[in-house]
């Protein structure tokens, strides 16, 4: 083969390699897009699962107020001299030999040992002051908790509120979902919780799925599906709130109301209105397997006030009362 033939052969090989590289780039681009689409759908599905599982994630362990009442006070720290004693021991055991005297180092060594004794004394004082500060803080906390436990066990309404504020079991709900809670306790220590569920900020308005071909499909969330998600989310939140409250205070029943922005047909304005009101019973929730229930169906276990249609969603209702 002459040089022209070799050149043509080389050009043909280069074009073939370029086509193969282009096909490989297209294949990788498709795979990357498919992987990205799968990640978006997975994230969407995980989010939906999360907002429907709020009731499964109770953070507060039951509080034993009687045990807190009987808890012993922290022990006051003792003033110790361990660092000073150790330095003194070295000072007292120092026995200069002939070389120390010969090179006149005895005085300098003794001075350094004396400095270490003073330094040890300061270290002992520093550690004592730190332990004292910790003790005072722990003692104040112990005194507060014991006093609170005594009042809670006497069904003091203000103590119930203090206990809920102290342990604040709703933090994760407020941070993750933007929900806001308002607590009130009457003179009989009966608790009512209003929870602003912010449906528009929580329930997605779009639905993500994959076509059989792997292409990402984004479409408007169907009205019926949106409303069902909304209902389950609200019921899940109320169950969670009730479980958290029962873990903190010794109430046997509480009322939890879900509040959201709704059109007031009398005024024509969007207003905060109650969309679900439930009177929860501690004993009933304790018997339920929260990990397996349907949040909406579970409301049948309690006295509740709810008007809901799959086609139109929630309607405003009157909150329950004790």
Image (cartoon, rainbow, N blue to C red):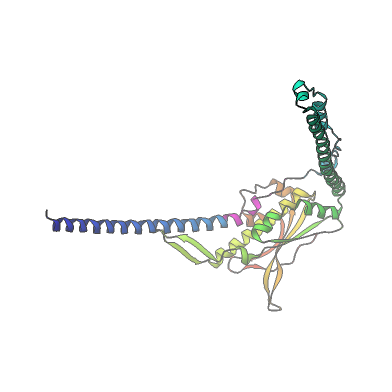
Q: Is residue 53 magenta?
A: yes
Q: Nearer the viewer, residue 303 or 285?
A: 285
Image position of 8 (left or right of 91): left
Which residue ends up furthest to the left in the rendered image? 1
Q: Nearer the viewer, residue 271 or 129?
A: 129
Q: Nearer the viewer, residue 77 or 109?
A: 109
Q: Quadrant of the C terminus?
A: bottom right
Residue under the image location 84 percent in, 59 percent down: 186
Q: Is residue 108 magenta?
A: no
Which residue ends up furthest to the top in the rendered image? 98
Residue under the image location 85 percent in, 44 percent down: 136
Q: Nearer the viewer, residue 26 or 160?
A: 26
Residue range highlighted in magenta: 49-62
Residue 312 lies, with reference to residue 236, above or below; the image says below
Count of number-bearing discs: 0
In percent of width and height, residue 208 lies at 49, 61
Image position of 136 (left or right of 1): right
In percent of width and height, residue 59 lies at 69, 49
Residue under the image location 82 percent in, 54 percent down: 162
């Amino acid at each position: 083969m002459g040089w022209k033939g070799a050149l043509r052969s080389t050009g043909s090989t280069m074009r073939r390699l370029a086509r193969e590289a282009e096909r490989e780039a297209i294949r990788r681009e498709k795979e990357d897009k498919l992987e990205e689409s799968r990640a978006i759908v997975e994230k969407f599905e995980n989010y939906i699962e999360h907002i429907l599982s709020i009731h499964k994630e109770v953070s507060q362990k039951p509080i034993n107020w009687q045990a807190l009442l009987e808890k012993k006070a922290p022990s006051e720290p003792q003033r110790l001299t361990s660092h000073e004693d150790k330095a003194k021991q070295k000072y007292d055991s120092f026995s200069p030999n002939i070389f120390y005297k010969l090179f006149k180092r005895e005085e300098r060594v003794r001075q350094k040992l004396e400095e270490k004794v003073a330094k040890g004394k300061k270290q002992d004082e520093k550690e004592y002051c730190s332990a004292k500060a910790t003790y005072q803080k722990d003692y104040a906390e112990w005194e507060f908790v014991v006093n609170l436990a005594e009042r809670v066990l006497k069904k003091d309404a203000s103590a119930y509120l203090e206990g809920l504020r102290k342990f604040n079991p709703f933090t994760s709900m407020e941070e993750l979902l933007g929900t806001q809670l308002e607590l009130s306790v009457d003179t009989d220590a009966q608790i009512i919780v209003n929870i602003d569920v912010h449906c528009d900020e929580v329930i997605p308005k779009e639905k993500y799925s994959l076509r059989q071909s792997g292409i990402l499909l984004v479409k408007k969330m169907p009205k019926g599906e949106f409303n069902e998600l909304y209902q389950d989310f609200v019921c899940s939140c109320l169950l969670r709130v009730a479980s958290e409250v029962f873990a903190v205070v010794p109430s046997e029943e509480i009322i939890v109301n879900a509040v959201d922005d709704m059109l007031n047909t009398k005024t024509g304005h969007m207003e905060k209105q109650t969309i679900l009101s439930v009177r929860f019973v501690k004993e009933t929730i304790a018997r339920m397997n929260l990990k397996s229930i349907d949040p909406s169906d579970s409301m049948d276990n309690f006295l509740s006030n709810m008007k809901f249609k799959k086609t139109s969603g929630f309607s405003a209702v009157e909150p329950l009362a004790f």
